[in-house]
Amino acid sequence: MINIVYYGNWTYVDLLSLSQRRSFGGDARMEGLLEASILAGMIAFARNWWGASSNRPAFVARVALWLFFFLLMLWALIVVQANAAWVAGIVAGLLFFGWFVRRAFQQGKDSGAQLMRVMVLALLLGAGALLVAFGDTLGNRVLDLRETSALLFRGEVEKVESPSIAGRAYMLDVGWNAWLRRPLLGWGPGIGRFLVYRSDVPKAYKGSSELHNNYLDVLMQFGVVGALLFFGFWLRLITRFAARVRAGRIPADVGGFVLAISLMFFIVNITDTYIAFQFGWFYMAFLCALLHSPLMRSATETEQAIDA
């Protein structure tokens, strides 16, 4: 529904096209909203289905839901052909998967532990099938990335065939040099377009206003002081959330999923676009609201809140 409203044409979205960047608009904004939607669904279902491992129907339902969403994300990240999102999804997915395997084999010999092991096997088989199906596409992408990386490390940006990657390299150079000139307080919000225009980048990139790295963008606009305040706020939220998970106030399954998706978001921002109109920050605000909403409370906390 978000995609229909944003683009106004559902037929524009083609998840099966590997030759064009059309999946969810082909940019990180729609991917971020996709992740937010998945997160909201996971939390809502988990709060309704949470029960003891001996409750086999509820546990089987959670297993099926987790498997479906995990494979859906992996498939979408491969099809979208957005390298940063793809790499971030794989990294976050592996960490999340490792945590899940560890938890599965820490369980006893009850039916819940057996179902967890079945899910681990299903995840391996499903992910393997997707990688085999898209093996050629992934292989070609890795080769292209190796060649492009070699040119960038040699400083031969003008030889890079991809305008998108070349533009990112030029913008990163502009942002880095600008930040070094005013490292503490930065240049102020909305200064990107002016700095790019006054730089010596090729004319084709003069009209750009984004650095394609939100962390460097924050440093350039607000300096070290602003960056510490900005990211310190998000770090505080995440650490508080992790503490609630460890204390048992949030279901561990939901906690692991939220933290893995948060990690993915922070990785994507390494090559993401400018801050002012970035849907990713909306996603973080949405996530922040969820972390402290009634959906994230334990049943006891919810009952106490209702009684109060």
Image: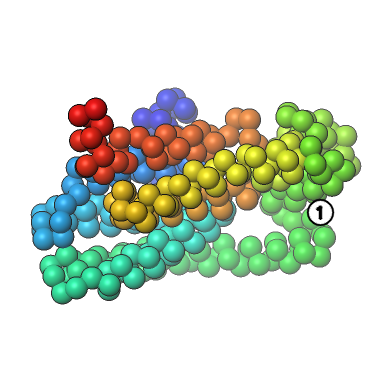
Q: Is residue 83 above or below residue 167?
A: below
User: Which residue is located at x 61 percent, y 44 percent?
Assistant: 231
Q: How many marks?
A: 1
Residue 149, picture quadrant: bottom right
Image x and y of residue 295, in percent:
29, 38
Residue 156, picture quadrant: bottom right
Residue 102 at least partly seen = yes
Q: Residue furthest front?
A: 308
Residue 207 at least partly seen = no
Q: Which residue is mark 1?
A: 158
Relative side of 150 to 63, left or right: right
Relative side of 144 to 223, left or right: left
Q: Is residue 50 above or below residue 30?
A: below
Q: Is residue 64 above or below residue 125?
A: above
State the scheme by which the image is colored.
rainbow
Viewer-side residue, 77 vs 291:
291
User: Which residue is located at x 61 percent, y 67 percent?
Assistant: 143
Q: Is residue 8 above or below residue 298?
A: above
Quarter occupied by the N terminus:
top left
Provide the secondary structure element on which disc 1 rests: helix
User: Which residue is located at x 31 percent, y 48 percent?
Assistant: 249
Viewer-side residue, 11 vs 123:
123
Image x and y of residue 88, in percent:
52, 56
Image x and y of residue 100, in percent:
33, 64
Relative side of 189 to 109, left or right: right
Quarter occupied by the C terminus:
top left
User: Which residue is located at x 81 percent, y 54 percent?
Assistant: 158
Image x and y of residue 261, in percent:
44, 50
Callout 1: few (<14), some (14-19), or many (20+) C-alpha neighbours within 10 Å?
Answer: some
Q: Label 1 is placed on what type of residue?
A: Glu
Viewer-side residue, 62 vs 109:
109
Viewer-side residue, 112 vs 87:
112
